[in-house]
Structures are given as structure tokens and as C-alpha cells.
């Protein structure tokens, strides 16, 4: 009887042991992943869309940092190396957006200890290098361990609408400030290239200058932008300049070629060239702050005709989204690379067509503005639609995606 009871107790204990052991991952990485997810759940998940990503396996001595758009380190005191090996997890609170934007870095060691935990705004780095998942979209997807926003990245098609040549004696400088070591470099590069091709078709190739990263070439910084503008002013006799920027950014600044470029610098240049009219498009996080940063004494320079920022001062800018919650939600899923700029290119093609160019001309005449400013404004309003949070072609501006992007515009008429 005692033997039978002992056997039953042994069987019961073994059953409980196996049941409990099934609840805990045996693989150290799986265990660390579970601890990271549980940590975020227990402290309260962010209200806006977010993604959990394993950025890298880290070793003893590795240094985890975060670099802001102005080039500064967010937590310089934390420059000592890790004392244990493990995995670096990233809570991306603006999934795939340009920097700066909120996030959190956490390292769990291989024995399950939390050994690093830091809230950040800037771009994560390990040993002063951006982890591969933040550079390559496919690696970001592969590294995703928790996709609360259900973002599905579709293959990018090669396309560009034919932009009918309409503008004469006007010029443009088309800039991407990103370098290959930075997050979203490829998306920004490809969006910039499409914008450049479109403006060259619109204005003539000789009236457009490119500022971008090239192997062995000059950095795509403010000096390069100034050189491009000066070249157009001097050699092409341009007196109407459109400037397009795509870059990582923060309040009143953006990162161009690894250096900080401030709104005050652009304001000074514009004021020094009072006989030149400027149209601006700024595609970066917190871009809306430039609508204040460009002002002097609360007044916008008189020679800025229109300034479009692809988001507000407090919100981020995003690469192309098509899905929300795993469902196709983009009203304009054929846009590519970068959410707002992709929509802009398609509307630019629409309004420069034979059928719709008269609308631009009529608007320019009615409001005594240039045809290029009229074109940009009509593109801007067409992208937003009547009620932007339900009609915008920019998915991240819609309520269904959390209204996490909010394009703004200044116009002098």
C-alpha cells in the first residue's frame, strides 16, 4: 500500500514538474525574449503602435549607447561596457520612423538577468555602430519579436510617374542627409532619388542639384547644400529655389551627413538672399518645429513662399506603411519608400498632367503666387483630403494608424 502511494506521489510530482517546465523556455534567447515582453506588459504597454525588436546579441565589454539627431549621446555616463553577455532588445515606440523618436533599450543576460534598461529618443548603437536591423528593412522584420502594430512591409515596386515639364527658370536642391550607417538610409535614398528625377523632369536637369551620400564623395551636409544653392544662383541665374530635405531630426534641427544642421542656419541663408524666393519641403521627425525655427522675431522671412513639413513639431515621420493590425489599410498602397513623399510624387504627376495643369495655373493667378508654390500646395491639400484623419493618403495621419504623423504647411498668401 505504501509502495503504491509512493508511486502515485512520484507520478504526480513528475506531472507537475513537466507542466511547470513547459511554461518556461529552455532556450536562453527564448527565455530572455519572454522576460523582455513580460517586463513591458507588467509596466504597461504604450498606447501608440509599437514593435519589440532584438537588435543584437551582445558580449562582455560591448557598449550600448543612443545617438540623437544632433550627434549627442543621450546617456554619456553609461559608456562602460556590459559585464555579462546577452541580447539587446528595443521597444520601438514609433516603428520604423525617422529619428529622434521614443524608445527603450533593454539587455537581458544569458542567465536571465536584466543588466541594462534605458529610455531613449535617439538612434541605438552598439560599440558606436547602428545594429543591422535598424539599417536593413528585412533585418528589422527578421528581428521583430513582438509586433503590436502589425506592420507588414510589402516589396517595393520600381515606379515613377512621368512628370510633365512645366516650370522654367526655377531650380531645386534635393537632399538626403542619411548615410549608410544610419537607420532608414535605403528608404531615404530611394525616396530622394525619385524626388530628384521628378524635379529634373519638371524643371530641367540643369536646374536641379543633388546632395546625397556617395562613396568617396563629400558628405551630404549643410556645406554641400550651400554649395549646391550657390552654384544654381551663380551659374544658372536661379531666383526661385525649391529645397527638399529628408533626414533624421529633432526640434529645429536635422542630421545632415552626420552633422547637425539648425533651422537658424537655413533662416540666415534665406535672409541673406532676399532677392531669391524659397519653397521648402522638410521630411523628418519633428519637422513642424521648423515653421517656428525659421522665424525671426516671430515673423517668417518674407521670401519664403511656402514651407511644407511632413509632420508636426511633436510627431514622427515614417517610411511607407500599407498595413495596420495585419490588414491592408492604406488608401494609396502604391506609394513607396517614405509615406508622405511617396504620396507627394504621385500627386505631382497628377497636377502636372495636361488635364490638371490648368488647375495649378488658375490657382496661382487667383492667389498671386508662383506656379511651383501653387503646385506644392495643391499636392499637399490633395494628400490630406477633406478630413485628414479619415481621408489622408498618408496612412500614418489617419486615426486607424493612431494619428502618429501630422503634416503642416506655411504659405505667404
Image (cartoon, rainbow, N blue to C red):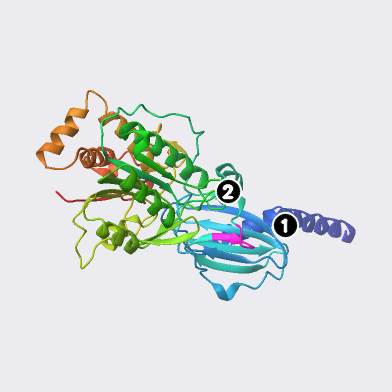
Q: Is residue 279 left or right of residue 136?
A: left
- Crowding near the residue tagged with mark 2, few <14, some 14–19, many ≥20 C-alpha atoms within 10 Å: few
Comparing 345 with 115, the one in front is: 345
The kind of secondary structure element at disc 2 is: loop
Disc 1, SS:
helix
Q: Which residue is drawn at 57% across and 68% down?
A: 117
Left or right: 183 with respect to 302?
A: right
Mark 1 and mark 2: span between their CA atoms? 43 Å
Where does the image place residue 119, in percent across and percent down from the top left?
Answer: 51, 66
Residue at 43 percent of width and 57 percent of height: 223
Height in image: 322 above or below 350?
A: below
On the image, the x and y values in percent for residue 145 come to 59, 50
Residue at 59 percent of width and 56 percent of height: 130
Specify the quadrant that holds the N terminus.
bottom right
Residue 20 falls in image quadrant: bottom right
Residue 319: percent from left, percent from top: 44, 44
Q: Nearer the viewer, residue 3 or 214?
A: 214
Up-down relation of residue 39 to residue 163 (above or below): below
Q: Earlier in the sequence, mark 1 or mark 2?
A: 1
Q: Is residue 331 visible?
A: no
Q: In which quarter of the image is residue 394?
A: top left
User: Looking at the image, do the residues carrying marks 1 and 2 touch, with CB atoms under 8 Å apart?
Assistant: no
Q: Give the range drawn in magenta.
A: 124-129
**Residue 236 shows in the view:** yes
For image coordinates 11% across by 42% down, the residue present is: 367
Residue 180: say if magenta: no
Residue 403: x and y in percent read: 34, 50
Q: Nearer the viewer, residue 94 or 112?
A: 94
Furthest toward the left, the residue is 366
Residue sitting at the far right: 3
Residue designated by label 1: 28
| Location of mark 2 (residue) | 216
Amino acid at each position: 500500500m505504501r509502495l503504491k502511494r509512493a508511486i502515485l506521489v512520484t507520478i504526480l510530482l513528475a506531472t507537475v514538474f513537466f507542466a511547470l517546465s513547459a511554461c518556461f523556455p529552455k532556450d536562453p534567447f527564448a527565455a530572455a525574449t519572454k522576460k523582455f515582453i513580460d517586463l513591458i506588459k507588467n509596466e504597461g504597454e504604450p498606447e501608440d503602435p509599437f514593435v519589440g525588436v532584438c537588435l543584437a546579441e551582445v558580449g562582455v565589454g560591448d557598449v550600448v549607447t543612443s545617438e540623437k539627431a544632433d550627434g549627442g549621446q543621450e546617456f554619456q555616463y553609461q559608456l562602460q561596457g556590459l559585464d555579462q553577455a546577452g541580447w539587446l532588445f528595443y521597444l520601438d515606440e514609433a516603428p520604423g520612423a525617422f529619428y529622434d523618436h521614443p524608445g527603450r533599450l533593454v539587455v537581458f543576460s544569458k542567465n536571465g538577468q536584466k543588466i541594462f534598461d534605458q529610455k531613449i529618443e535617439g538612434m541605438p548603437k552598439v560599440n558606436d555602430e547602428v545594429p543591422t536591423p535598424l539599417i536593413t528593412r528585412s533585418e528589422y522584420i527578421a528581428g521583430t519579436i513582438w509586433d503590436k502594430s502589425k506592420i507588414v512591409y510589402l516589396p517595393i515596386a520600381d515606379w515613377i510617374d512621368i512628370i510633365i515639364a512645366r516650370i522654367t527658370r526655377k531650380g531645386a536642391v534635393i537632399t538626403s542627409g542619411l548615410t549608410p550607417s544610419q537607420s532608414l538610409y535605403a528608404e531615404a535614398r530611394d525616396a530622394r532619388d525619385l524626388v530628384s528625377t521628378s524635379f529634373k523632369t519638371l524643371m530641367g536637369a540643369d536646374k536641379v542639384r543633388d546632395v546625397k551620400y556617395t562613396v568617396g564623395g563629400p558628405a551630404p551636409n549643410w556645406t554641400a547644400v550651400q554649395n549646391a544653392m550657390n552654384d544654381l544662383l551663380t551659374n544658372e541665374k536661379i531666383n526661385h529655389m525649391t529645397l527638399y530635405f529628408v533626414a533624421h531630426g529633432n526640434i529645429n534641427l536635422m542630421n545632415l551627413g552626420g552633422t547637425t544642421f539648425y533651422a537658424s542656419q537655413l533662416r540666415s541663408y534665406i535672409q541673406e538672399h532676399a532677392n531669391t524666393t524659397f519653397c521648402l519641403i522638410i521630411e523628418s521627425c519633428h519637422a513642424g518645429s521648423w515653421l517656428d525655427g525659421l522665424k525671426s522675431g516671430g515673423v517668417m522671412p518674407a521670401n519664403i513662399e511656402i514651407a511644407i513639413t511632413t509632420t508636426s513639431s511633436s510627431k514622427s515621420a515614417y517610411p511607407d506603411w500599407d498595413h495596420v493590425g495585419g490588414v491592408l489599410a492604406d488608401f494609396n498602397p502604391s506609394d513607396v519608400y517614405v509615406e508622405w513623399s511617396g504620396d507627394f510624387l504621385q500627386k505631382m504627376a497628377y497636377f502636372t498632367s495636361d488635364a490638371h495643369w490648368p488647375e495649378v495655373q488658375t490657382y496661382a493667378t487667383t492667389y498671386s503666387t508662383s506656379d511651383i508654390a501653387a503646385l506644392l500646395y495643391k499636392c499637399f491639400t490633395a494628400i490630406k483630403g477633406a478630413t485628414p484623419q479619415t481621408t489622408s493618403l498618408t496612412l500614418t495621419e489617419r486615426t486607424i494608424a493612431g494619428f502618429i504623423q501630422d503634416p503642416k504647411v506655411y504659405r505667404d498668401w
